[in-house]
Structure formats: structure tokens, C-alpha cells
Image (cartoon, grey):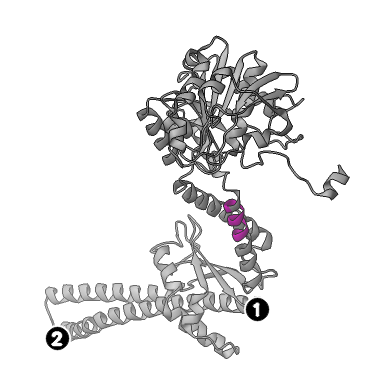
Amino acid sequence: MTSANRVPDDQDEPALLRDQFRQLLRYRALLAAGVVIGLFGGGFLALSGEDTYTATGEVLVRSAISDPFAAGASADKGINIGSERQTAVSDTVGTLAAATLLKAGDDVTARDLLAGIQVTNPPNTLTLRFAYTGATPEQARARAEALANAYLTHRKARTEDSIKNMSAGYRAQLGPLEEKRDLLEKQIGAGADNDVTSARANIIVSISELSRKISELKALDTTPGYLNKKPVAPTSPTGPGLPLLLGLGGVVGLALGLLLSWVRLVFDPAVRSTRELVRSLGGPLLGTLPRERAATGTVLAIGRGGSRLAEEYRAVAFRLAYDPEFAERRRLLVTSPRGDNQEAAAAAANLAAAFAEMGRDVLLVEADLRTPSLARALGSAAHEVRPPRWAAEEGDGSWPTGARANVDVPGSGAFALVPGTTVDNVPRALTSTPVGRIVAEADRSGSVVIVLAPPVLSYADAVALLDRVEGVMIVCDPREVHRSDLERIREIIGASGGSVLGALLHPGRRRLGPVRRPASARRRT
């Protein structure tokens, strides 16, 4: 039956992504906690933070030019806009703006003033955008305007200082030339030759050139720029509002929840998917039982009309009936990994009923001799009958040669039950000759023997029965069983000479027997 259940290809990336996403959704509590934390954080930032206001002004930077109306004149000659942006946030500009604000009654240091300014340059422009963030609208407007004007003042002063320095340098060159010119003029008056006259003419040309440069420097337009956009007081606070912060908080919280779920998934020892269960157990998945509340006082779902649980048990029985390995021996050992054996007992009883419905002679043996409860759980459906003749002749009345029961399945037939009883020596009872003779009844044509054993990892009872009942079905809850448990079960069964026919998954713990409801619930019903 190993080829009946196809394991999806590991290279199927969409299937793997869907599987991982479904695994993350198993931890809905962590996802919800992450979203709640994100929303709380966003709301806290929105409500606890102080409102801030941002005022913006724009300054067009220009260089000094002699004739701005001349053809080909360029206002960006010699301007490095990156350096100008650094100058706008320098300590010199901050000190000038702080002095201006102090005169207006705003006592602020240059460092605190520059902490709230942000100067940017729009691409492909000579514009500096001054954006100041303050506690009040008027404060933001006044400080943004003071910083922009301080930058223009500082740039104008820097340009004028450059002109003064250059003019002083030209005058320093002009003084010696004028003295030499006067000396040559005296020599010409005394009857000098042509060489003196020529030298005097050259000096006069140099003096004229320096005088022209000094005049051009004095005629330069030193306007540093224009305040194109004057800062105005903002009417609303800056920054994201409450709806936007809540949305961002929700997104961040969801990401946090996914991260927590992923960490939990990585360190979760439980089986994370059906593919992993099949790989760890080494057997196919026979079926998954739906969650259904019992409507009668018996554990049997077979014979109950309109039951999805009964249909799933029938499907599992048909899969086993047409499995070559099971059809050869017609023996089935039903057990669970750990804990109680209630779900395994319910599965064994319903599979026996399903095989009886198919017309098989079914014998259900309860080999759980430590906590036997199957006969009590079946209730009135089980009727005690006399044991077979060989049991009365060879047995001493103890298990399994003691009393037998006939279990009636409404509309489906009946199957025989060997109920379990407490014994002094469980291993001796399980390995006795009568047990082998009872299991050998499956050799008859049309017969099926189902043995219910205690949890395989809790007791060695199931291992003691594997030499007589080779086919094993594991009944487990995928949310509680661990991967290491399934791998250990596979190793134990393989080493004992048995084989795993498959796994049957149940949705969780439910009672094996009558469900007692409160009187108020019965009255409402």
C-alpha cells in the first residue's frame, strides 16, 4: 500500500509555499498578538506624541554678475549647490539667525535652531528649500524665515569680502606702477630717449588695466539670491495621522506575528504537514476523521444515518480491503503513539463495523489489558455470548478464552468482540497460545481480525503482538504527535518484523462513550 499515497514533489514550489503558509496559520494566536501589538504601538505613537509643525521657504541662489541683462549672462556661474546647501546649515548661519530671533524675543541657541532645520535642493535647480519643524506654527514660520535671511546675509557678506580683498590686491599692484610712472615723467622732462618713453607708455597701459578691473569689481551686482517663497505658518500638524499610524502599525504587527509564527514553527516538534507525517511514519495517510458530536450513547458511528464520520471510516475500510498487503493476511493491529487509547479504540470498533457491513466475519480483540474499556464504551450494542468450543475446552476462563460478546451494528450486521480484562501478567497473556489461535482465525476465507493494542511508545504490548499481527495502523492527532515519535514507531515496527499500513488522523480528544449534557441543554434541545 506504499504506492497508494503519492507524496508531492519537493520541487513543487507553489505547493511548498501553500503548505508553509497553512502551517503559519496554525498559530493564529501569535498572528493576532502581533497585529494587536502593532495597532497598540501605532495608536500610542499617534496619541502620545506632541504635534509638530513645518514651515517651508525657498531661496533662489545666484552669483555676483556685472550686467545681469547682457546676452549670455549666467546666474549659476561658479555656484556649487552642494556646498551652498552645507553652508546653509553651518554654525555661522545658525548664529546669525539666532541673533535675529533674539531681537524678536525668541531665545534659542544656534545648536537647537539648526537641529530643526532641513535644507534640500530640488533636482536640476539652484533653489534651496528651508523646512523648519517647530512646536507651534508661528515658531516654525519665524525660524524658517530667519534662517533663510541669515543665509542670504552671510552669502552677501562673503561676496563683498571677496570683492574688497580683490580690490585691495589690485590697489597694491597699482601703487608701485604709479610711482614708476611719475619717475619716468620726470626723466622725459630732462630730455630722455625713446626707451624711457616706451616704458612710460607700457606702465600707463598696466595702470589703466588695473583701474578697469577695480571699477568692474565695484560695479558687480552682489545680490546673493532671492527669497522666492516666503515661509508661512502651517495650518495643520506634520507627520502621519492616527489612521495612517494605525494602518502602519497593523502591517508591522502582521509582519511581527508572521515572524513569531515562523520561529514557533521552526522549534515546534509536532508534525507540521501531511507530507511530513507520511515521510516520518513511512506509511500512507489512510484518512482524516471529521469533528462530529456523537448523537447516540455508543462509540459506533457506523449505522448512524447521515454521519460524515461513518463515511470516513467506510472509506478507510475500503482502502484497507483493497490493499495487497492487508488482503493477504487480513490482520490489523490498531494502536496510538502515546497517551490514552480512546481514539484508537473508537477507530478499531468502527473499522470492525465497516468490515462487517462489507459482509466479512470480523473478530475484534481488545488486547489493551491495562485499561480495558471497549466493552463498556460499546454499551448495549454488545451482547455476551458463549465462547467457542475450543476455548471452553482448552482455556481456563481467563483472557482471551473467557467470555465473548456479539456487537450489533444497526443495519450493518454484527461482529465478534473479545473484550479485554485486567490480568496479573500482561506479557505472558499476550504471548500465550490462545492469542495465536484467535489471530489465526483470520486465515479463514472472508474473515478479518482486528487487534486493539495499547500505545506503542508507552507499553511493549503492541510489539509483543507484531509477530502474529504484522499490519499496523497508527491513530494519532497531528497537532500532538511529534516527528521523533513517528520515526521511532517506524523503527520499532520495522525491527519487529511488522509493517505500517498507514495512519488515521483524528481532530482531537473526544469522549469514548455517552456524552452527558447539562439539563438546560437537554431542555433547549
User: Would residue 288 be seen by someone viewing this image from the given angle?
Assistant: no
State the image quarter where residue 352 is shown: top right
Tag in front: 1 or 2: 1
User: Would residue 171 be seen by someone viewing this image from the given angle?
Assistant: yes
- Pinpoint residue 144: horizontal percent, then vertical percent: 57, 75
Q: Of helix, strand and loop, which one carries label 1?
A: helix
Residue 36 belongs to the span the image colors magenta: yes
Q: Image point 75% across, 36% down: which residue?
A: 297
- Pinpoint residue 136: horizontal percent, then vertical percent: 64, 77
Per the model, the C-alpha gap separating discs 1 and 2 is: 78 Å
Crowding around mark 2 (Cα neighbors within 10 Å: few <14, some 14 to 19, many 20+) is few
- Pinpoint residue 309: horizontal percent, then vertical percent: 68, 29
Q: Image point 41% across, 64% down: which residue?
A: 82
- Pinpoint residue 339: horizontal percent, then vertical percent: 53, 44
Amino acid at pointer 1? Glu
Amino acid at pointer 2? Ala
Q: Which mark is residue 190?
A: 2
259 lies above or below 236: above
The C terminus: image quadrant:
top right
Q: Is residue 518 left or right of 403 when viewed as pictured?
A: right
Q: Residue furthest right?
A: 523
Q: Image point 68% across, 59% down: which residue?
A: 243
- The first of marks 1 and 2 along the sequence is 1
Q: Which residue is mark 1?
A: 138
Q: Of residues 410 and 525, which is closer to you in this image?
A: 410
Q: Of helix, strand and loop, which one carries label 2?
A: loop
194 lies above or below 74: below
Q: Are marks 1 and 2 in contact (CB under 8 Å)?
A: no
Q: Image point 66% across, 73% down: which residue?
A: 233
Residue 42 belongs to the span the image colors magenta: no
Q: Of residues 129 and 490, which is closer to you in this image?
A: 490
Q: Which residues are magenta?
A: 30-38
